[in-house]
Image (cartoon, coloured by chain):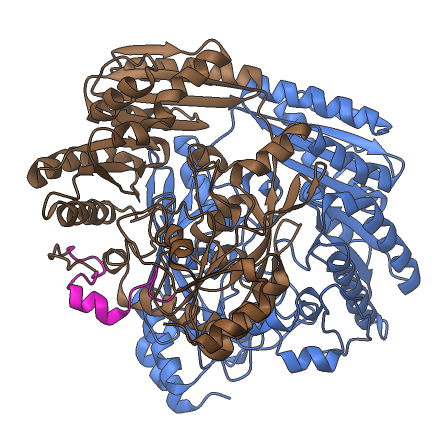
Chain colours: A brown, B blue
Amino acid sequence: MLSPAFLSKLRGILPAHCVLHEREDLAPFESDGLAAYRNVPDVVALPENEAQVAAILRLCHAEKIAVVARGAGTGLAAGALPIDGAVLLVLTKLKRIKSLDPLARTAVVEPGVRNLAISEAAAAHGLYYAPDPSSQIACSIGGNVAENSGGVHCLKYGLTVHNILKLRAWTIDGQLLEIGSDALDAPGYDLLALLTGSEGMLAVITEVTVKLLPRPERAQVVLAAFDDVAQAGAAVGNIIAAGVVPAGLEMMDRLAIEAAEAFVHAGYPMAEALLLCEVDGVNEEVSDDIRTVHDVLAASGATEIRTADSEEQRLKFWAGRKAAFPAVGRLAPDYYCMDGTIPRAQLPHVLQRIREMSAEFGLRVANVFHAGDGNLHPLILYDVNRPGELDQAETFGGRILELCVEVGGTITGEHGVGLEKIRQMCTQFAAPELARFHAVKAAFDPAGLLNPGKAVPELHRCAEWGAMHVHGGQLPHPELPRF
Amino acid sequence: MLSPAFLSKLRGILPAHCVLHEREDLAPFESDGLAAYRNVPDVVALPENEAQVAAILRLCHAEKIAVVARGAGTGLAAGALPIDGAVLLVLTKLKRIKSLDPLARTAVVEPGVRNLAISEAAAAHGLYYAPDPSSQIACSIGGNVAENSGGVHCLKYGLTVHNILKLRAWTIDGQLLEIGSDALDAPGYDLLALLTGSEGMLAVITEVTVKLLPRPERAQVVLAAFDDVAQAGAAVGNIIAAGVVPAGLEMMDRLAIEAAEAFVHAGYPMAEALLLCEVDGVNEEVSDDIRTVHDVLAASGATEIRTADSEEQRLKFWAGRKAAFPAVGRLAPDYYCMDGTIPRAQLPHVLQRIREMSAEFGLRVANVFHAGDGNLHPLILYDVNRPGELDQAETFGGRILELCVEVGGTITGEHGVGLEKIRQMCTQFAAPELARFHAVKAAFDPAGLLNPGKAVPELHRCAEWGAMHVHGGQLPHPELPRF
């Protein structure tokens, strides 16, 4: 619990309407997009400018109060879950687009600016911001940087870290860090990449300079149906092996297809698996790639192949995919969206193992994911009111992540680790890497006040969980305790 | 000086032929590619396997002996300059290509493998490794990672950090770090990017997993002459603004053109500035881009435009550029190759200022550089035997780097900081960033044994030099003392 003395100091920094402490005002902030984790914050601070952010950090540093930074709260790994006795620092009021340079193709924005708002502002110049998480209408760029967010198009255009140039960030003791440059490279250790994906544990970002790209001359999408999931998985590898770099290469399995059809009637063919492959670029390049993709899909055993021949049809092809999560949400009271990444070659094997585990746990799974970059999003269906099902869903999810590591992949593609995956960090990394993570954390935040307990597990916790990874060794599969 | 006791322990780890300590054996290692900085090492260790590297690091850690890691020694910033009382750890004997996976498009190589050797090994599969420093025939991948090397093609294909997936690295206390993954992203702080460009100050790399790219279907180059350098600089921005992403966009000024012509007779037109713009990709895309580039160059005031219509001619166009450094080397007893990066829009202004400074210092400058990504390589001509000229050349070079910072650029594009640019780090960064760099260093190497004194200046040194950068303030131009 925060002391009245501290709260009054906080009110000394912020106007009254920027400090929330009444229970009903705090409730909306009890969780981010991963609603299975909830904790009502003690206080919410909503700074309106950079100076206030710095002052709050200095205050918290002086009083040894923890700080959890939060953007739009669309995160899916409980990275912004409030912590008792901490200030929830919500940056949504910092939402100015400070400048946009169409010639240099950059925009300087505050962390609270919505991802999509950047592309909307750039559209007048024929430019856009490439990373497009499915939450892009709501999620903020600050959160995108904190989690190194991706999206449908990151296969071709990269993750957030590949699409930003500079950051203004504040350390817990209120020092300004100006990181990166407008040029190609920056000297010194790469703090830009280090802060990107650091989940608010190293510094608090107050400004982001993003790269803007010219809108591609043309985009076209091909839809292919398969009567076998593994075949569809293999087709993904074949497309890449053919030398095409799709702008997006998405996969849905039968359960996801059925759900999407029932929800938005996209006109998808019923099948065991569906691939959506979009290519973009200059006209001839797109025609070329579409031909190649079509041939590869046919050779890979697609039972039906459709090519969108109008922008209207292209959007219809995407409608089902874009609505897949809410659509699947209608199949069960609750679903748990996983996020792991695997080498493409492992897709058939991993999809098969997920099917087997689904039977083993007695929980249905809908697969909707960025197949092109091996970024899986299995949706585990459960009912929180059925005793033990949440536990089962989480254990199942954990097993999927451990499977990703087992085949040479990682426990996150674009959602981050947060609190959700902190146990799987013990399987992903060995003690030396984890020790280095803690040392890097201490280099920025020696007192451990920024988002404590997230992203990087204490070594002893890994030992307790019996899940410590051994280089080159077997992965243990202990019954992991609930948090 | 290293004690006989230490040397005998070192000989206990390595076979006799892998420990060099005779003066004549040590001489070749007294400098890297920046010969203005020389220091004969006390001892050279040439491990033949990873276990020996780890054992040497453990020994040095136990005995508190500094370690300077070195690859092929082609670096241009004195990053591998030997330090008195330290072990020079030369990794050239670790030169196995351990595996190459054409489907996943990756290769796993040891640090001593030459940059070009990777592309040679991949050629059989129609693949290549994109980053191509001009030293690529000799430079090793370990050094490329240590300096985050670029090359002619990094405008389109990125720097080393964008073309590697995983690292095996050893901390000074002999712990193995396995960093990165075969998948799109890795959880935890981005240690892969942090180690890339860290100049051997955080860990010693013993294995690199690189990405391989399919050889482009076609590459074509356009040559354009300008009778005004600033016009050529503006043309560079116009090409990018037209939406073309050239595979390479190089610029040479009159002195460089004359030198190259006299040396290799590439048939270049005499002009104040020459642009070489290469585009690659699928056939139609290339034709499209070549048309666009041609139109933009004409509209930008090019006095002559030639398009290579055969592979033979393409190579001839490049011959002059590739030979430019040795060619300029024939104009004066010595030259000093600078490396700074600026926002493209600043090219005309910066080239003008360099001309003015050239007159001011009475030293000729040949400009040969990666114009597309704003990476300047001014070659300052001097004669080390003329009293004071080396000092003048270095002061001039320092001014050029400070100018780069002044216009929003950086003091390095692809050569790193090493010892050469350590003073300019004080203008590039303010105290908070430098303090964070030191903290990150301490997180990996608390005793400061890995390549001490390179890349990141002590704060008090910046104060002594009077060159401390003030956020948003003016840049001081003190007479910087010689090292």
Q: In the rendered view, would you say B96 is above or below A103? A: below
Q: Which residues are magenta?
A: A452-475
Q: In the rendered view, would you say A9 is above or below B137? A: below
Q: Main secondary structure of the magenta part?
A: loop
Residues A262 and B265: in front is A262
Q: Position of residue B353 (x, y in %)?
A: 86, 54
Q: Is residue B390 visible?
A: yes
Q: Position of residue A317 (x, y in %)?
A: 39, 17
Q: In the rendered view, would you say A292 is above or below B151? A: above
Residue at horizontal 88%, vertical 59%? B357
Residues B194 and B38: in front is B194
Residue at horizontal 17%, vertical 39%? A382
Residues B433 and B212: in front is B433
Q: Position of residue B346 (x, y in %)?
A: 78, 47
The C terminus of chain A is located in which quarter?
bottom left
Q: Is residue A472 magenta?
A: yes
Residues A85 and B28: in front is A85
Q: Is residue B243 visible?
A: no
Residue at horizontal 44%, vertical 77%? A64
Q: In the rendered view, would you say B5 is above or below B165? A: below
Occupied quadrant, residue B80: bottom right
Q: Is residue B326 magenta?
A: no
Q: Position of residue A69 (x, y in %)?
A: 46, 59
Is residue A255 toward the left or the right of residue A433 in the image? left
